[in-house]
Image (cartoon, rainbow, N blue to C red):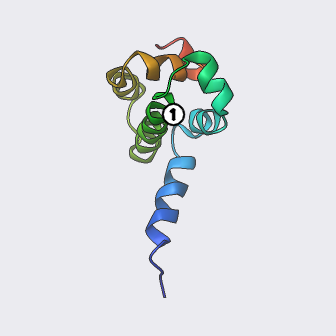
Amino acid sequence: MPNRFDQLFEDADAAFNGQYKDELACLTGMSKAEIDAVTPGTSDLAIYSVLVKVVEDASKQNLSQAQLIDNIKELGEVAVKIAKKVPQFYGLL
C-alpha cells in the first residue's frame, strides 16, 4: 500500500538521478558559510533554496542546459553568484 510520501520520494529520486545530478549534488553540499562567502546577506539562503529547486526541477524535467541557465539568470545576481560555485555552471554564467 503506497503511503503519502511515495510521490515525494519519487520526485527526489528523479531529481537526484536526472540530467543535472552532479550539479545538484554540488549545490546541496554547500554550507551556509560557503553561501555567505559568495554573497553575504540575509536573503541568500532563501535565494539558495529557490536555486536548488530550479535545478531539481530542471533535472526531473530534463531541461536543456540553455533553459536551465536562463532560469538561473532570471533568479537574479545572487543566484548567479551562488551557481557559479558549481564548476559545471561557472563557464556558462
Nearest the viewer among 27 and 67 is 27
Q: Residue pushed farthest front?
A: 42
Type of amino acid at the residue the image marks with label 1: Leu
Nearest the viewer among 75 and 56 is 75
Q: Is residue 17 visible?
A: no
Query: In the rendered image of this protein, does residue 82 appear above or below residue 48?
Result: above
Q: Is residue 9 left or right of residue 25?
A: left
Q: Which residue is mark 1?
A: 45
Circle 1 crowding by C-alpha within 10 Å: few under 14, some 14–19, many from 20: some
The location of residue 86, given as percent across then percent down, is: 60, 23
The location of residue 3, given as percent across then percent down, is: 48, 80
Q: Is residue 68 left or right of residue 3?
A: left
Query: In the rendered image of this protein, does residue 42 appear above or below residue 63?
Result: above
* SS label for mark 1: helix
The location of residue 90, given as percent across then percent down, is: 55, 15
What residue is rendered at 39% in x and 29% in y? Answer: 68
The location of residue 26, given as percent across then percent down, is: 64, 33
What residue is rendered at 60% in x and 23% in y? Answer: 36
What residue is rendered at 67% in x and 27% in y? Answer: 33
What residue is rendered at 53% in x and 22% in y? Answer: 82
Query: In the rendered image of this protein, does residue 68 appear above or below residue 28?
Result: above
Q: Is residue 17 left or right of residue 46?
A: right
Q: Is residue 83 visible?
A: yes
